[in-house]
Image (cartoon, helix red, strand yellow):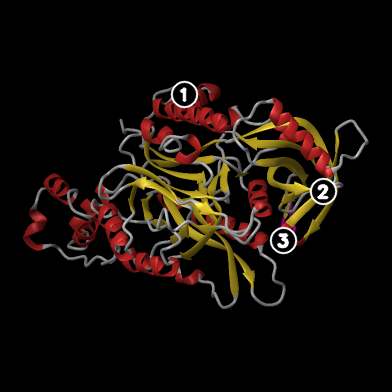
């Protein structure tokens, strides 16, 4: 049975068609999704009632820690399809001990080939347990057996088996999967410009403009996503929200056979789930689905501002830097600089053993194909790995001589305080004060319909969680306490993508504007809040 309910028989339904529509709607609203989809195909009148029932957006999600893949998939599907929904997209986050290929196959078989589906392996999952209805943050620890590059999962303390499934229905929006491809033969360079143009072209084809409402991205763990995210940030308008996991392992199904890519010809470096306004339903009286992004940061800057003097890129994607303090010509030795930085942290009486990063301000020109975009300033984070007499070493490339930077270190108090700020931010979203401030600014009366939050997604750094904060559910609390019983799902990942919305707590507590906007984070949690504004009441 197709869950979209599009292949209806068009029959009359016989005697059942005489049932009062209100009574019929009450009955149909109690059906699970598969039975509901079957009911939509009974007759034109039943299909009309079913369509009227699904006029508001809906997100359904469930988590299972059943160690059996087939049982876990069955548990989450039984939960998310227990109520009427007409899926437009699905996302699954799974533990690495579950087969990515087999899990993706089971999900696509269950939902059919007509909707976009992304399955992504995660370092942990967040969601409401399908059996107990308890909100869970489950993080799978890593063990370091063979040095800093080893990321073997600790299968002794945790089996790394679990799944959280998200299924969404967003009337008024079109949803599609767009991959970032890299040819396996010839010039084996990622086609980033094509990726951005494909997103814009799809959006234009369904909405009449090139500005998507939102993008949920997943990058391959072997690919440096910094230049990809930076280009997307430059190309997309401010109102487009961008979130995701930059360092995962994923499979996808586009749901559109006319836009298929062969795995024999291409590597897939990333995939974007694109949400765009449906121009065919812009005046259908169905209201508006909106996305809002905020984040909790877990790093804090310290020490003087420095400038990269020379940059050498060596094997394994590392950069070797020499630096000077701004206003001074003396080049600082790598190990001497790190010793000084450690002394500063000692003076600040930091009890924990923090991870060390540099936040680099990068002024770059950007183009998409032959179109030159505006120059932009961004903030990119690089983990500090060590140093020698002349250089210090960071993980990653893309730094240029003349780039300025600050040192940052992880800090649990900063993360906790930032979570409290997110709570207040989402509380303001719930009470409508965000919208009131915006309406006051543009001189619009406060007499419109109120915003209703119907779902949320969380992308949290795998270094956070209960072991970091000392108590459970710190990252999910800002959403779950503000919006109890609203579906929430998420994952723990290595690099969090988050382009925060204007006016969010992240912008209020963020860096100086001259440091640039950061869209690829460390030690942070990114929140995507999905809300619905009903259409104005007809007079």
Front residue of 454/132: it is 132
Q: Nearer the viewer, mark 1 or mark 3?
A: 3
Where is residue 507 shown, x and y percent of the image?
Answer: 60, 31
Point out which mark residue 461 bears: none
Q: CA distance from mark 1 to mark 2?
A: 55 Å
- Picture layout, residue 85 above or below residue 470: below
Q: Looking at the image, which residue is at 73% across and 42% down?
A: 376
Give the secondary structure at mark 3: helix
Point out which mark residue 388 bears: 2
- In the image: residue 328, left or right of residue 75: right
Could you tell me which quadrant the N terminus lies in? Answer: bottom left
Residue linked to disc 1: 436
Find the magenta span and give its range: 368-372
Residue linked to disc 3: 316
Q: CA distance from mark 2 to mark 3?
A: 17 Å
Give the secondary structure at mark 1: helix
Q: Looking at the image, which residue is at 35% across and 67% down?
A: 106
Front residue of 165/149: it is 149
Q: Residues within 10 Å of mark 2 (few under 14, many from 20)?
A: some
Q: CA distance from mark 1 to mark 3?
A: 50 Å
């Amino acid at each position: 049975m197709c869950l979209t309910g599009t292949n209806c028989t068009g029959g009359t339904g016989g005697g059942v068609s005489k049932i009062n529509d209100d009574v019929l709607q009450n009955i149909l609203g109690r059906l699970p999704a598969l039975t509901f989809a079957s009911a939509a195909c009974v007759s034109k009148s039943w299909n009309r009632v079913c369509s009227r029932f699904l006029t508001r957006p809906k997100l359904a999600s469930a988590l299972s820690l059943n160690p059996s893949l087939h049982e876990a998939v069955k548990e989450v599907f039984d939960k998310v399809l227990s109520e009427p929904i007409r899926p437009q997209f699905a996302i699954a986050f799974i533990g690495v001990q579950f087969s990515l290929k087999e899990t993706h196959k089971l999900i696509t078989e269950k939902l059919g080939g007509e909707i976009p589906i992304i399955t992504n392996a995660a370092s942990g999952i967040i969601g409401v347990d399908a059996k107990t209805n308890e909100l869970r943050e489950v993080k799978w620890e890593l063990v370091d057996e063979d040095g800093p590059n080893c990321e073997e999962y600790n299968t002794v303390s945790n089996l790394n088996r679990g799944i959280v499934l998200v299924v969404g229905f967003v009337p008024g929006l079109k949803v599609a999967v767009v991959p970032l491809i890299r040819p396996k033969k010839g010039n084996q360079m990622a086609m980033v410009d094509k990726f951005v143009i494909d997103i814009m072209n799809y959006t234009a084809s369904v909405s009449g403009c090139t500005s998507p409402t939102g993008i949920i991205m997943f990058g391959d763990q072997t690919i440096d996503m910094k230049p990809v995210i930076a280009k997307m940030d430059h190309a997309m308008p401010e109102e487009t929200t961008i979130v995701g996991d930059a360092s995962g392992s994923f499979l996808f199904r586009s749901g559109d056979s006319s836009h298929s890519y062969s795995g024999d010809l291409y590597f897939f470096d990333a995939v974007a789930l694109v949400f765009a306004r449906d121009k065919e339903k812009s005046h259908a009286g169905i209201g508006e689905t909106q996305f809002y992004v905020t984040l909790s940061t877990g790093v804090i800057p310290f020490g003087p501002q420095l400038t990269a003097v020379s940059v050498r890129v060596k094997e394994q994607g590392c950069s070797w830097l020499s630096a000077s303090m701004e206003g001074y010509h003396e080049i600082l030795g790598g190990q001497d600089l790190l010793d000084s930085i450690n002394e500063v942290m000692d003076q600040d009486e930091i009890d924990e053993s923090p991870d060390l990063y540099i936040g680099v301000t990068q002024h770059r020109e950007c183009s998409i194909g032959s179109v030159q975009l505006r120059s932009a300033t961004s903030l990119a984070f690089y983990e500090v790995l060590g140093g020698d007499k002349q250089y210090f070493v960071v993980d990653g490339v893309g730094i240029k001589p003349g780039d300025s930077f600050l040192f940052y270190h992880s800090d649990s108090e900063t993360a906790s305080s930032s979570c409290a700020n997110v709570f207040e931010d989402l509380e303001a979203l719930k009470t409508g004060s965000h919208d009131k401030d915006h309406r006051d600014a543009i001189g619009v009366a406060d007499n419109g319909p109120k915003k209703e939050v119907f779902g949320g997604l969380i992308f949290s750094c795998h270094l956070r969680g209960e072991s970091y904060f000392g108590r459970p559910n710190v990252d999910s609390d800002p959403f779950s306490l503000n919006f109890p019983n609203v579906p929430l799902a998420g994952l723990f990942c290595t690099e969090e993508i988050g382009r925060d919305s204007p006016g969010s707590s992240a912008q209020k507590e963020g860096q100086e504007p001259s440091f640039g906007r950061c869209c690829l984070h460390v030690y942070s949690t990114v929140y995507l809040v999905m809300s619905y504004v009903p259409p104005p009441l007809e007079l």
